[in-house]
Amino acid sequence: MREIKKDIEQLEEVAHQLDKQTPTGARLALLLLDNLIELLAFKKVKKIFAFDEMYKLPGKLPKYSPEKRKKVKDHFKEKINFLVSETKDISHDEGDFLKVGHELRNEAYHNGVLRDSIILSVTSVHYEIVCRLLPRLWIMSYSYSREDEVSAFLNKYGIQGSMIDTKSLEKICINLLGDRNSTTDNLREDISDDLINRIDELVETLESYQPDVRPDLTPDELLKEMQFSQTFPGDLKFPETHEGFLGFHRTRDEYRSKFKPKVILATIVRWKRQAAKIRSEDRPGAVMRKFSEIDRHLLKIEDIIYEAVAEFDIYIDSQIHS
């Protein structure tokens, strides 16, 4: 019973962090939820693979190869995909949500990406999904426990009985969820607004800095130049002579003339239209999947533009104080 008590305690701590209604609390809750769902998924697939090995037909190979098993056990996305397609324990929409939630967890933990404007609504829906999934993913085994210990545990959640089963876990999870149900309305509105606001800010930054940074270029040309600067070979030594300087820039111009930017202003306008359409999506997993499809490209261009702006600001400061 120790394992299931630990899982329930983890959900209780998630509820405590969410009840703070702060972005920091929501981020901590997301870390706990992502950890719990990965452990539940790992135990589930491990049990499936054990049964596959144990009950294979004489002279036949197991259904799942060693390579397949390793790939599933080693990677979060593969575990979720397996439980969506192979066992149907997780729906496609739940799987989509969990995979994007894992991405948000990773970027928060490793890169400090905060997501303050969406983290509360995302984590609230994530909590609801994990509360639904825990009874489904439970492998229905725990170490021997005294009957009175089990009864005391269940009684804490208003359940009479002396045995933990799927039904009792469902009741516990409903109890934990309480009135914390988060609607898809909040999620899709927050997600859509986040993308649209970031896109508007990006375009405004590009257009406002263009006259100062490169007055000879249009905003679209400046956007191309910023992307090109990220790809131009960095191993070309900057020349020390005038002739070398001219040759360097001829080479750069040749590279630039062939360069096709992945993002132009029309691309960003298309992202904004797609972001607006998210407000009409009624499935949380689809909301998060569509968010991720835009966000992963938007993040890259945000980094490029804001890095270029920061470099320009440093240059201006150095000129003022020189």
Image: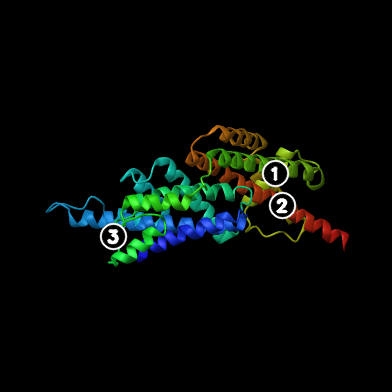
- Check disc 3 and give the amino acid type: Ser
Residue 132, position as x, y percentages in the image: 41, 47
Q: Looking at the rendered structure, which numbered label has been put on residue 141?
A: 3
What residue sits 69% from the left and 45% below the top?
225
Dividing the picture into quadrants, the one containing residue 202 is top right
Q: Left or right: 285 with respect to 23?
A: left
Q: Looking at the rendered structure, which numbered label has been put on residue 229?
A: none
**Badge 3 or badge 1: first in the primary sequence:** 3
Crowd around label 1: few <14 · some 14–19 · many ≥20 (10 Å):
some
SS category of the residue bearing label 1: helix
Q: Left or right: 83 with respect to 52?
A: right
Name the foreground residue: 1 vs 28.
1
SS category of the residue bearing label 2: helix
- Check disc 1 and give the amino acid type: Leu
SS category of the residue bearing label 3: loop
Residue bearing the label numbered 2: 308
- Check disc 2 and give the amino acid type: Ala
What residue sits 38% from the left and 59% below the top?
155
Image height of 40 relative to 219, above or below: below
What residue sits 78% from the left and 58% below the top?
314
Q: Left or right: 65 with respect to 193?
A: left
How far separated are the C-alphas under marks 3 and 1? 52 Å
Residue bearing the label numbered 1: 202
